Amino acid sequence: MPELSEVAQRNIKLLQAKTPVEVLTADVMQVNLDQGTIYFFFDPFGAETLSGVLKKIQASLFTIPRKVRIICFHPGPRKSLFDECDWLSLSYRYKDRIFIYQTS
């Protein structure tokens, strides 16, 4: 949704981000995720898409090893998909709303 990307871009400017931030508006299954180190998901996708995205990120770690963090806001019933990823560990939790996972 382009309008949400615009909101994200404005928020980045307001926060005066000190590191490069890229906001993408695209089909997540078609995007190259090989360079990312922090991924933010708000109420992420359906289970099938989320599972595919997590597999893409994991596969990218073999090509480009790096530390990755995934911030998930409102995962709902899809939280179990994150928990099933043995390459991720939960590093932070705020109530049942915000979860941060990271590679070991």
Image (cartoon, helix red, strand yellow):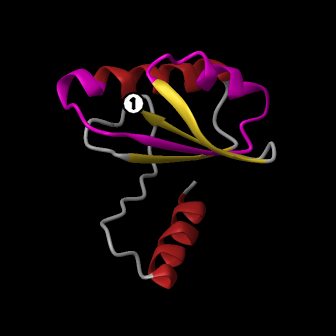
Quadrant of the image occupied by residue 29: top left
Element carrying mark 1: loop
Q: Is residue 85 left or right of residue 76?
A: left
Q: Is residue 55 left or right of residue 35?
A: right
Quadrant of the image occupied by residue 56: top left
Residue reaching furthest to the left: 63
Q: Which residue does the image show at 57% across and 24% down from the upper left?
A: 49
Which residues make up the magenta segment? 60-87
Residue 9 lies, with reference to residue 26, above or below; the image says below
Q: Is residue 2 magenta?
A: no
Label 1 Cα neighbours within 10 Å, binned few <14 / some 14-19 / many ≥20: few
Dot 1 corresponds to which residue?
A: 104
Most foreground residue, 24 or 89: 89
Q: Position of residue 40 (x, y in %)?
A: 53, 49
Q: Position of residue 74 (x, y in %)?
A: 74, 44
Q: Is residue 69 left or right of residue 67?
A: right
Most foreground residue, 20 or 97: 97
Q: Which residue does the image show at 58% across and 54% down from the upper left?
A: 1
The C terminus appears in which quarter of the rendering? Answer: top left
Q: Position of residue 30 (x, y in %)?
A: 37, 31
Say what amino acid the circle numbered 1 marks: Ser
Residue 86 lies, with reference to residue 82, above or below; the image says above
Q: Is residue 78 magenta?
A: yes
Q: Position of residue 11 (x, y in %)?
A: 54, 75
Q: Which residue does the image show at 42% across and 52% down from the upper left?
A: 24
Q: Which residue does the image show at 22% across and 31% down from the upper left?
A: 65
